[in-house]
Image: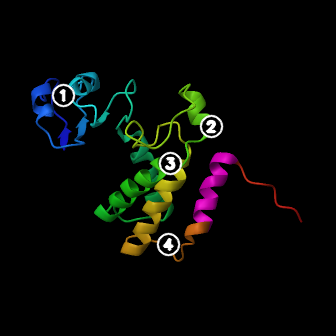
Amino acid sequence: MFLGLSVAGALSKEMVAKMAPEPVIFALANPVPEILPEEVMEVRDDAIIATGRSDYPNQTNNVLGFPFIFRGALDVRARKITEGMKMAAAEALAALAKEPVPYYVKAAYHNENIAYGKEHIIPLPFNKEALIWVASAVAKAAVEEGVARVDSFDYNAYREQLRCLIYGCPEETE
């Protein structure tokens, strides 16, 4: 596994060629990653690759995490952001990546074939569901860890409230 946050060229094709089967390469230097995905693919077609760039699959950046981590924390009035809350966010994103990709995301990327796999291990930034998955996981973790300042927390009701923010709610009838 390679996790880079350094400079372009820090990882060579020769280094990649020596890695174990199915290496995971997160080349996250921006704007030019430590190694370009096409360079990896020249020597390893079994690699799982992510960069911080939007022009490659598996874009890894904070747009999927920070806004929704803070949303969940603020909604339960958390005193702080804990490691558990950050792990809950990461686990929620990992789970969301395995869900069917919504039609509007496929349309935004002009790709009807987006599905969980080597080129889709991270939800895409246009996936509105990230708000629901991440914020609710973070809020739940805050409550469970005792850093939330709410009297009660209904996880399912909170998820539904977030869903209504995105998609709208049916009007209640009298």
Amino acid of disc 3: Ala
For the residues labelled 4 and 2, the Cα–Cα distance comes to: 36 Å
Residue that badge 2 annotates: 103
Type of the residue with mark 4:
Val
Residue 15: give its label.
none
Establish if 171 lies above or below 49: below
CB atoms of marks 1 and 3 within 8 Å: no
Residue 83 percent location from the top left of the image: 29, 62
Q: Is residue 169 left or right of residue 106?
A: right
Element type where label 4 sits in the image: loop
Residue at point 68%, 47% (across, down): 167
Mark sitting earlier along the chain (1/3):
1
Marks 4, 1: nearer the viewer: 1
**Regarding mark 2 in the picture, which secondary structure is present there?**
helix
Q: Which residue is mark 3?
A: 130
Q: Nearer the viewer, mark 4 or mark 2?
A: 2
State the separation of the CA atoms marked 3 and 2. 15 Å
Measuring 37% from the left and 65% from the top, which residue is drawn there? 79
Quadrant placement of the C terminus: bottom right
- Do callouts 4 and 1 mark residues in contact (Cβ within 8 Å)? no
Circle 4 crowding by C-alpha within 10 Å: few under 14, some 14–19, many from 20: few
Residue 172 point in image, percent of width and height: 82, 61
Residues at discs 4 and 3 in contact (Cβ within 8 Å):
no
What segment is highlighted magenta in the picture? 157-167
Residue 17 visible in the displayed image: yes
Image quarter for residue 103?
top right
Label 4 or label 1, whichever comes before in sequence order: 1
Nearer-N-terminus badge (3/2): 2
Q: Which residue is mark 4?
A: 150
The answer, for residue 69, to whether it is visible in the render is no
